[in-house]
Amino acid sequence: MADSLDDKLRYCFEEMVVFKDLKKSNFFTSLGLPSFLRDWVLKKFEDDDGEYDVEEVTDFIRKYLPRKEDWLNIKSRVIYDAERVKLLTKIAVDIDTKSGEVSFSLPNFGLQHKETIIEPKVWEDYRQDLTNGQETWGIVELGYRMPDEKSRPKVSGRIKLTGFTNFCPYVAELDFFKDARAEFSVDEWIDVVLGAIDYNPAGYGSKEEKLTMISRLLPFVEKRLNLLELAPKGTGKSYVFGNVSKYGLLTDGGKITRSRMFYDKSRSAPGFIVGHDFVAVDEVKLVTFDNVNEMRSVLQGYMERGKYNIDGYEGESEAGVVMLGNISVDNMNESANMFEELPVLFQESALIDRIHGFIKGWNVPKMRDDLKVSGWALNSEYFCTILHLLRDDGSYRAIVDQLVEFPPNAYVRHTEAVKRIATAFLKLLFPHIRAAEDVDVREFQRYCLTPAMNMRRIIWKQLALLDEEYRGDDKSMPRSFIKDEEEHGSETA
């Protein structure tokens, strides 16, 4: 059996492990590849010792992962040189309900549906792979359909899809993942999770720092989990939410409209809340809205129910809403009003009440070289695919419901928030648990229930500062209890 954590990881997870050395592999950083793409490339070219030929990797990236500014040249090759060009990129497919015509867009290059077509034979060959989500990563092959001026009606020229290879070269098996997790202690597993998202566990000064960092992953693994994180600059918020998973979306601060976020009536197209596991709004202090009241109404309704109505269009999604902001050091105090620096929309108590939990980002150290992973770690693409699949597993919430009870007068939004966060922690840290009887109650209390209560308690404190309606005695923020206390010991949150 393995002697070190690296050896144990390789033994238990076999082909799902890659050697990451972010201190040395700066050329990956310079190329701007997100973690899941970088690990895919590393896995393709690394040998058993984690070594790879830099020139070979660079040539592959230049060929299949061109920069956005290379798009005009690619377009010229496809249209004027009649080349078949292959790209590893994100593709989104749409079907015209009137004509039945299928088109696609390449969001990373600005190629729009009106410029493209997928012809019937190609659509039949690749339809299953292309309809797995709102957007799909893969190797797309592009060609050109020449215009035909003589036909009636005239046929315009279009860039066409001629081939597609799914990005994921393996089947992510949840049972295999769960069984492998059972071989690790909690402390070992926390370190494995950190390595999977590119961080070096040895660089952290305490377990609290580690747990705060990985709490950012909770919306990756639990549906419609709404969080707010306020933190100093340089603690890696944008990196985690924007680079680690292909299933989430990080949107920069700026103007956010109802059409961008939820539904664009002019284009009859859903906004970016649809088709993602989470939408993280970065630099929330700088966000502006074209119509604050309109956005407040739709956002509150969505955060409560996962549904929205835009001028008669009924939409729904399972994406969590995550708000990320930097605040001054003087304001990093959960007992003081931390929201006074935020836009007025985020000082509305009814909306804040729909945020399940608060991440104290000041517990995460600023990024340093010794926090960058250097060693064997889970492939980020594989790990985040597993987290995505765990979202559909309802057994963990059933376990939490069996383990935890609240007093009958407990506020329903508190109980739901705590249970939802505790469920996410259970999936993230104890995915091998199959039934309530398998749970170590003290571990569940320490790593799932207590953190969930603390994350929700900060939201409640801020609500009480914002709105006197939320002020009151301790009954307003009840303590939760492990069921069968006498059997398991007196363990309360």
Image: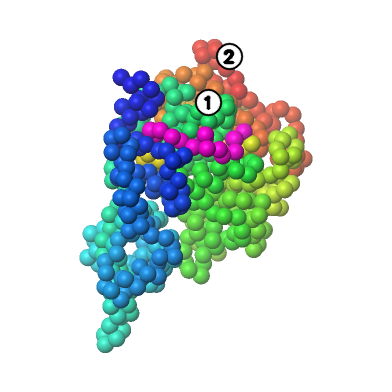
What is the CA distance from the residue labelled 1 to the residue labelled 2?
A: 17 Å
Instruction: Please report the bounds of the magenta region as a residue range.
Output: 363-377
Q: Which mark is residue 352?
A: none
Where does residue 161 sit, x and y in percent of width and height?
29, 65
The image quarter in which residue 153 lies? bottom left
Query: Is 428 displayed left or right of 417 in the figure?
Result: left
- Please state which amino acid type lies under the numbered disc 1: Tyr
Query: Is 78 displayed left or right of 219 in the figure?
Result: left
Q: Residues within 10 Å of mark 2 (few under 14, many from 20)?
A: few
- Residue 115 higher or lower than 428, as above or below: below
Q: Residues within 10 Å of mark 1 (few under 14, many from 20)?
A: some
Q: Which mark is residue 490?
A: 2
Where does residue 166 sit, x and y in percent of width and height?
30, 52
Sequence-wise first label, 1 or 2: 1
At 43% across and 21% down in the image, what residue appears? 185
* Residue nearer the viewer, 311 or 74: 74
